[in-house]
Image (tube, rainbow, N blue to C red):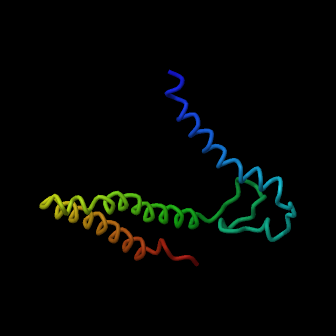
Amino acid sequence: MLESYFPVLMFMLVGLGFGLAPVILGRLLAPYRPDSEKNSPYECGFEAFEDARMKFDVRYYLIAILFILFDLEIAFLFPWATVFQEFIAAGEIAWFVFGSVMVFLAVLVIGYIVEWKNGALDWE
């Protein structure tokens, strides 16, 4: 029974190794010279080392969530694109599948237009 789990264990160990190796090598080999530029605010808009209960602008998080939302559509389009050739060979079902994907994309485009018109994508 243990030998049936051996490939899963090896997969987990190799994955853990690939994840930890760059972090450990970076810590060991890279020079550690922090300066004011490295510790300055980058994309989040507030100082890196201040009080955790300070007020901050939530527009960054709104943009990040919208990016994730509209970027996730690719995760749904790849499976459809990979098997679409098989749907074409099937005949009538190809038009149903194509139509359903076009409706999905239309909903995403309408959502994008609504967000654009409401000013959620404006950064001042």
Task: Where is residue 72? Give x, y as percent.
Answer: 43, 60
Residue lying farthest to the top in this orientation: 1
Instruction: Give the side of residue 27 with respect to residue 84, left or right.
Output: right
Question: Where, quadrant-wise, is the C terminus in this rendering?
Answer: bottom right
Along the line of sight, the residue nearer the viewer: 31 or 101? 31
Residue at far front of view: 3
Taking the image as shown, residue 95 lies to the left or right of residue 26, namely: left
Q: Nearer the viewer, residue 46 or 39?
A: 39
Place of residue 89 in the rendered image (x, y in percent of width and height, measured from the top left): 18, 61
Q: Is residue 13 above or below residue 62?
A: above
Residue 100 spot, x, y in % from top left: 23, 61
| Image side of residue 115 versus residue 89, left or right | right
The residue shown at (80%, 71%) is 37
In this rendering, the answer to whether 34 lies above or below 52 is below
Residue plotted at (62% across, 65% down):
57
In the image, 95 versus 85, the foreground residue is: 85
Viewed as shown, does residue 99 lie left or right of 74?
left
